[in-house]
Amino acid sequence: MLIIIIITIFICCCFSETTEMTWCDSNDRGLIQYVSVSKGLCDYTDKNWCGVLFSYFNDSDCFEIYNSCCSKDETRVDLNEFHLIDNIYDGRNSKRIIRFNFKGSPYARAFHNITIEEYHPRINFVINTYYILPKSIITLTGREITYEEYPYFIIAESRPFTIKTSLENTLEYINLNYTWGFSPGVFIEGRIAVKLTNETIRNDCQYRYTSDQYVINRGVDNNNLQVLDICYVHNRHRMAICGKNVPITYQDCSCSYSNFEYENSAIDCSFLSKYLSFKIKPNQEFIPYEREWSTLITTGVDSKITIPKDSSMIFFNDAYLPNASLSIDGTCIFKGIIHIERSDVLYNLGHFQATLFEYGSIEISKDPVLFIGKCNSNLTECNKVLSNSNIKEVNCGGVLNRYLYSGSTLGCKCTQKDSTYFEQSDCSYLTEGRQNRMKLVLEYNYNSGLTKKYWSSISGKKYDNGELIESIILEGSSIIVENECDFRNIKVIELKGSLRCGILYLSNTTKIIGYAGSSLRTYSIQIDNIVSNMNKEALIIMGDGEFISDGSMNKVLSTDQTECFELVSFNNEVSKSLDESTDGKYVSLVVGKMIRICPEGYNKDDRRKIICSVENGVFGNFKYHQCPCKGNECYYDLGEWKEITISSEKEYDMIDGNVIITNSNIIFNNVRSISSIQSNVIPTIQLNGNNDIISIKINTNKTMNIISNQNIYLSGSAEGVSIKTTKNNGNINIVGVYDQIGVNISYTTTITIENGNSIASINNQGGFDISNNSLIGNNKVRYSIDGRCRIGRMINERFICDSCGKDEIKGSCLENINVDNCLTYGITGRCIECQEKYYLSNNIKENEINQKCIYCLDGHCKRCSKEECYECEEGYKLEEGMCKYHDTNCKFYSNGYCKLCENGEYVNNIQYCSKCEINNCEVCKTHDPKQCEICSNGYYLNKSLLCEKININNETVNSGAISCYEGYYNDNGICKECKKNNEYGKECLECTNEKCYSCENEYK
């Protein structure tokens, strides 16, 4: 008996020394159990490696799963099972921790199947998914009893995974913590109760996980938040964390994509796109990788999506086109019905494939456009779909087609709803492309906007009763009409933009009125019926607008048009090639501010004559836009008016044209200049002006009497002229040819007579003088004062200057003298300053001044006199009146003085450089070698103003280091090593002066 006991004790002692309770891979394929085995048998490092490590740390069993888990044959990438069975209770309540480790391996599994078979109801499990293989599955099973206070703690990091349970009668609890603040894509299946933890307060909703119908929502551990089921599709619930004020009825089954990611961290869009709606942004320039979706929606505003040419988007369910415009640039495939419920917004479906269209709610009586695009199926399939949908296709020249209801006769026309909108939704869009051939029927005003609009034709609507449209306003940056602009059904076109017409159709009563900034371009005009408006209002009145054409302009007119007529009036210039250009039947004339059209061979003397009639006795009140005119072709008919008042506007007070006087007495008020006066009577003309001088030119074979209280400049020719002036100290300048001149003056007056005229009579009541009261009689000389002369007098019929201001020589004033290399001339015309490197020489001989700019003797001198230099070039200094080069360490000279030395030196006086007396000093203070301002690289300026070496720094400033190498941090200008900081530990690789943020491998 004693022997048996001893043997038993021996066996137990031996066994206890050679065995241990540990976690072991029971089948070498990832089936992990807590069992008693020989020591070291389940050490899975080195030769026993199977892609998993076990450790015991801080009262926790830790399982570290690598991406090559789980098989001793690492090359078996199909063996990806990790099955943990915990069914032996040894009295320990240690926590179980599962985490995943990334290790580069050629045998990494695509994903892991992880099964946790836990039988103890009060064991805490922590699963950290940071390095979990994407799309791995974690299955929870085993327990028959569970407690909410003992949940599985799931840490969701950056990779998607699935959590599920196979238990049918037990409810598992999990607490889900998103450490990055958003979901990587978590899918939960089975009888699992989920609570979110550590969530940040928000006002909106953000996706967290997707669950099936068995999962129970336990909410969130924050009373300011709530977890809502915001979408149910394909037997899946879309769960989101929301602010407490979000209505519990809030729903969102859409996915928005921008900046190359799904908005609101909705990662489920990557996995469930086929069951969710793609929400198009207002300008969706990029689309996600997922191309299959349930349907499309927008944000409620005009939207455009661009799909790459080598790709397409597929929508499986019915698509209800939005209430705002939608434009698709690319290919879309619609598997369901496309519902169209509005015709007043543009739907551009791009290149599409469809099965059926439905538009039963659309009012078709006003010829709406249902949508535009191009059917991308084969011809047979396209025709079938359109026929089944009762839709017809119309091509207007471009890539995209119009789609109308089958009974429409609209074609490519655009009709107006009002001055802002068309009845057809595509008109504004399609007319942005030159290749489209749209036809605009005008009934209201039209504004093309800020972009160019291209039309095939524009015409006024033709009413059945023959009534014409009173007025149409055309405006916009550019309206380009390839063919006809037919305005024959419109009385007045007001042009406030740019219009270009292939052919311009007008009636003889149509008016086009241009405004400032407008333009009308055409090279072909056709006019119905005879036009009779010579010297009246033109058909086209451009004003400050621009009329553009040239000598090639073609004109189609009535065969009964035998007289000239006014086509265009304008303020701006037109092409000179228009003048006298002909198309073989009619000649275009540019006369004044008009384009006049005359039949070929029309040679009457009024062919180029412009006649402007003065209205209401005011010169400036003209009935027609071409007035006032200018030049020899211009004639002003004053009618029976005996007093003409010049308009106060400055452009009118100089009358440049032929003034026809038919009354014997006439008064001009506010006049400054009249270029030509013609009369067939002997008139008395009274000139009242606001200017110092009134200038007039007369051209008559009669005698003309002129009365004025202003200075007068008279030119031209006449049988005789009589001038009466009441101005004291006035001037009369007479130029031209007159048989007789009479001057009646009441005060001292200066008269200048030119071109050999005689003074027939002088009423010298107040005196008649030419400067200094020297009287003249019947002199045939020209008297004028040199522009330089200040005071002069007449001696023996010769004018002598008494004072030129300066430089008077022999009674005349010298002309300007041109001096080479002179920089500045004075008011007398003399040089007063030469250019650099020259000095001025003045030589007076026999009352003549000879000036020269002479080159300085010293070639490096900038300013000098004949004897010495005053200023040298840079790099030279002035010594004893000469420029001398310096070969010191001076980097920059100015005015002979050194201003900047080489590094490490300073200006010790105004001429030389000396070395700084402080070691490692780059720049020391001027005139003080013992005070450093900037230290050399690797040193900093300490409080004693000395340069001290900085330990392992990259750059220096006056206060020390500003950046350090890797592994060091900046502590008030000193670089200190992270590993030597007791607070961080020797494993710290990168840090700041506040915390460590990078550790060596296997540390965190």
Image (cartoon, rainbow, N blue to C red):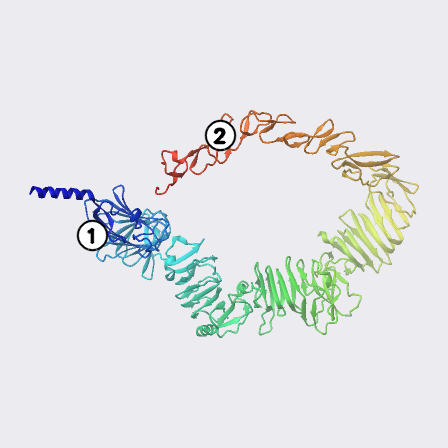
| Amino acid at pointer 2 | Lys
Q: Is residue 248 visible?
A: no
Residue at (42, 33) in percent of width and height: 976
Q: Nearer the viewer, residue 338 or 35?
A: 35
Three-letter amino acid code of the residue under disc 1: Ile
Tag nearer the camera, 2 or 1: 2
Q: Pointers 2 and 1 in contact (CB under 8 A)?
A: no
Numbered circles on residues, count: 2
The residue where tag 1 is placed is: 145
Residue that carries the numbered disc 2 in the rendered image: 949
Secondary structure at badge 2 equals: strand
Say which element carries label 1: loop
Query: Residue 126 location, x and y as percent?
Result: 28, 47
Q: Quadrant of residue 918?
A: top right
Camera-side residue of 811 and 1003 = 1003
Q: Depth check: give the residue in front, 364 or 465.
A: 364
